[in-house]
Image (tube, helix red, strand yellow):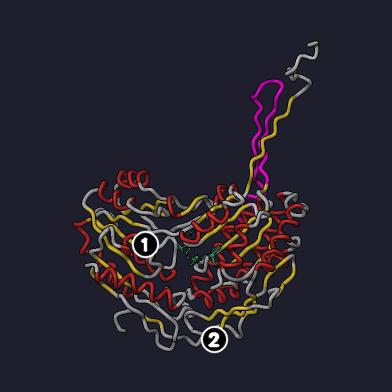
Amino acid sequence: MTNFNVIAATDATGLAEPFDARHLIDGRWQASADGATFERASPAHGSLVTRASRGGPQDVEMAISAARTAFDNGTWSQTSGKDRATLLLKVADLIDRERDRIALMETMESGKPISQAKAEIEGAADLWRYAASLARTMHGESHNTLGNDMLGMVLKEPIGVVAIITPWNFPFLIVSQKLPFALAAGCTAVIKPSEMTPATTAILGELVIEAGLPTGVVNIVLGYGDPVGAAMTTDRRVDMVTFTGSTAVGKAIVSAASGTLKKVSLELGGKNPQVIFPDADLDGAADAVVFGVYFNAGECCNSGSRIIVHEDIADDFVGRITALSRKVPFGDPLDPETKVGAIITPEHCAKIDRYVRDAAAGGAEIKLGGGALPVPGLNGQFYQPTVIANVGSQMPIAREEVFGPVLSVLTFRTLDEAIALVNDAEYGLSAGVWSDDVHTCLEFARRAQAGTVWTNTWMDGFAELPFGGVRESGQGRELGRYGLEEFLEAKTVMMRIGRTRTPWVDPQTA
Ligand code: NAD
């Protein structure tokens, strides 16, 4: 395995003992009503990491009741922006205090590198602080130009009880893209983390209680999509579902939620292209491409999993990428030097490999990698950094989410051709362009059909800027002011000034 930069098992000990995760319902930590549990092992090390209560219909019922009661009695929904902000800031400080503990759990459950996990927890604390700023500054509209006898107002009100359903790839960061914004708006919540990564959401539950959030405002039910997630999407007492996960489950949620016409916001998958022009900073582009495809082992909605390279530079550029790929440290996620850790499950690792085999059978050329990566001293599952050229635009590997460290390379001759390839997709999450010509970048930014466009950069993100997808990548936006708006309803109030209303019926009529 000398071809790759493999980080063998470290001496780091991981967890002293497995985490015991239970539901948080109406301010109390509870086992499942039927006593059921499930376990999670480290995808890198194989060791038991978490024993969690496995929610059923009764647990969901109690959690939704608690969230509904807490919303309706106004203990949170009628507090001032100042009070909400104070509490959100307190949670942010507690997240900072617990950073190392949360990051370790995140690494042990998800397989992501510890240095990355720490950065994600810091990023999550920042989101809580940003949401606190929104809690104090949100406002509606007033209309003072409707005539002398009329004043109009648009009040912003919390939408109500929000069901939050999250995936395993960024468990703590994604719940922090939703929950503080929902709380800033005045909503109450029932949260279901992925069955793969329940622990850090449970730790967040500890922190919101310690910060002093009123009972029942945040509830957490652990367990599987069916029955926990499914019950959260059909219950009439839930006003909104905010979901991050696969497009297939997103579609199932839209149809489940249609029975009660609750609002649904969705952050789904992507097959995100970067277009590389010959006049670009090719070293910078190559580094960003390698980062974009291997970050989080490619298990990332924003994975830059396909590049579209100008024909004149394709061979040179692929050479740069394969050379850089060999240098990326893959291996034990507990080693602070590691940049790419384990694949979430053996089944998912096999799925990644099937995409690669099928592409090769269909005529694509494996330039690098294309198989499992043994890591000395570990018995978890890892996949090699993989680069595949000669990929046809209709091949599954060019269109579907592989969700692994696998890069597909396509080529183009003209800007129109590149844009056509970018937009010939079911997904529309993000897209990027690399060129030193500002006109090329602007034209690309306008014509690419995606929720986010990066020019001469990849995968930057800011609390201030909205994030979300078009087409089958989702609906609605997270982050920024848009992220708060998702959790607000607009109520129109019209007020007559004085007894000026013209009667509809003439009282003098006989
Ligand atoms: P998933 O869709 O399998 O599961 C996501 C969550 O939904 C889990 O908590 C799961 O238990 C729950 N669930 C499953 N079936 C359900 C049902 N019928 N009703 C309600 N809930 C149900 O996704 P995953 O494998 O955990 O995560 C990977 C996916 O998430 C990828 O497709 C990735 O692109 C996407 N993702 C998107 C973004 C984004 O912001 N666009 C961010 C991260 C991940």
User: Does the closest atom of ligand 1 sit within 8 Å of the Cβ of label 1?
Assistant: no
Residue at image point 65% right, 30% down: 143
From the viewer's side, name the closer residue of 249 and 47.
Answer: 249
Give the amino acid type for the residue marked by disc 1 in the picture: Glu
Is 43 positioned to the left or the right of 423 in the image? right
Q: Is residue 47 above or below residue 255?
A: below
Viewer-side label of 1, 2: 1
Is 393 positioned to the left or the right of 43 in the image? left
Can you tell which quarter of the image residue 197 is in? bottom right
Q: How far apart are marks 1 and 2 (CA)?
A: 37 Å
Give the amino acid type for the residue marked by disc 2 in the picture: Thr
Q: Please give the range of residues in magenta.
A: 130-157
Crowd tier of the residue under label 1, counting other residues whose Cα lies within 10 Å: few below 14, some 14–19, many 20 or above: some
Residue at image point 44% right, 65% down: 300
Q: Residue 400 carries which label?
A: 1
From the viewer's side, name the closer residue of 89 and 142.
Answer: 142
**Which quadrant is the C terminus positioned in?**
top right
Image x and y of residue 127, in percent: 58, 58
Q: Which mark is residue 81?
A: none
Dot 1 or dot 2: first in sequence order is: 2
Residue at image point 69% right, 60% down: 64
Q: Residue 13 carries which label?
A: 2
User: Does the closest atom of ligand 1 sit within 8 Å of the Cβ of label 2?
Assistant: no
| Magenta stretch: includes residue 137 | yes
Instruction: Confirm whether residue 123 shows in the render.
Output: no
Mark 1 falls on what kind of element?
loop
Can you tell which quarter of the image residue 288 is in? bottom left
Q: In this view, does 43 lie above or below 414?
A: below
Hey, which residue is sitting farthest left in the picture?
A: 312
Is 156 positioned to the left or the right of 297 in the image? right
Q: Is residue 331 above or below residue 191?
A: below
| Magenta stretch: includes residue 504 | no
